[in-house]
Amino acid sequence: MSTNCANRWIIRGDFSTRCQLVERVETQSSQVRSPLDFNKIIPLAYNNISLQSELWGTKWNAYNVFLEHDEQNTTYTFLTTLSPPYKKLILTAMNLFPGLEYEFLYVEGKSKSYGRHGTHCKDYRTKFRWKKKDPDQGSDFMNPYDSDDDKEWEPVLIPTLSQFQELYDMSR
């Protein structure tokens, strides 16, 4: 079972303010280059996993980060371990740049749940409904939360939540 949490952070608003945010959260050194570094939002004095979890809301920094930045939107798509960084880290970043609009989507691979938060959208978190990949193997719909065998199951996404499909695929 995957411990990845796939995340998408969409930022809208004034382009120059979004450019400032992009510059603030990026890290560039001779050893590391990433468009999103959690240390740039909530700095840690040293590498302390329990402190990272407490301050960032997730065990490790973002990885497999992809940035799309244009006149309309700035979008970070990235993985974290076990949980999304929304409640602490992303909210802190949002407070640093309050004039922007934010939407944050995530899919947790291990807990088989997903959620959405944002400036102008209702927050929610829920579990996937699951179905057998092979309907001849038994009942159509079940909740296999006790099963570690993800290979037999696939999520049932209602059409309005199809935006989560790519994140779900990333989390596996």
Image (spheres, grey):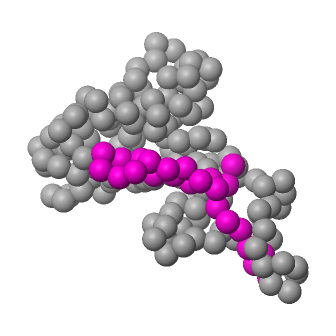
Name the quadrant of the C terminus: bottom right
Q: Is residue 8 left or right of residue 102?
A: right
- Picture coordinates of residue 27, whole percent (x, y): 35, 34
Residue 17 seen by the camera = yes
- Picture coordinates of residue 125, whole percent (x, y): 55, 50
Q: Is residue 164 left or right of residue 34?
A: right
- Magenta stretch: includes residue 130: yes
Q: Nearer the viewer, residue 134 or 81?
A: 134
- Magenta stretch: includes residue 35: no
How many numbered marks appear? 0
The span picked out in magenta is 111-134
Residue 76 seen by the camera = no
Residue pictured at 24% horizontal, 38% vertical:
21
Quarter-of-image position of residue 48: top right
Residue pictured at 49% horizontal, 75% vertical:
159
Which residue appears farthest toward the top when viewing the image?
Answer: 45
Residue 61, relative to residue 52: is it above or below? below
Residue pictured at 49% horizontal, 28% vertical:
56
Quarter-of-image position of residue 155: bottom right
Which residue appears farthest toward the front when viewing the image?
Answer: 122
Which residue appears farthest toward the right when viewing the image?
Answer: 137
Q: Nearer the viewer, residue 30 or 88?
A: 88
Q: Is residue 58 left or right of residue 129?
A: left
Q: Nearer the viewer, residue 69 or 134?
A: 134
- Picture coordinates of residue 158, whole percent (x, y): 54, 73
Q: Is residue 163 left or right of residue 148?
A: left
Q: Nearer the viewer, residue 29 or 159?
A: 159
- Picture coordinates of residue 144, whole percent (x, y): 80, 61
Residue pictured at 84% horizontal, 53% vertical:
146
Residue 2, relative to residue 95: is it above or below? below
Residue 84, relative to residue 6: is it above or below? above
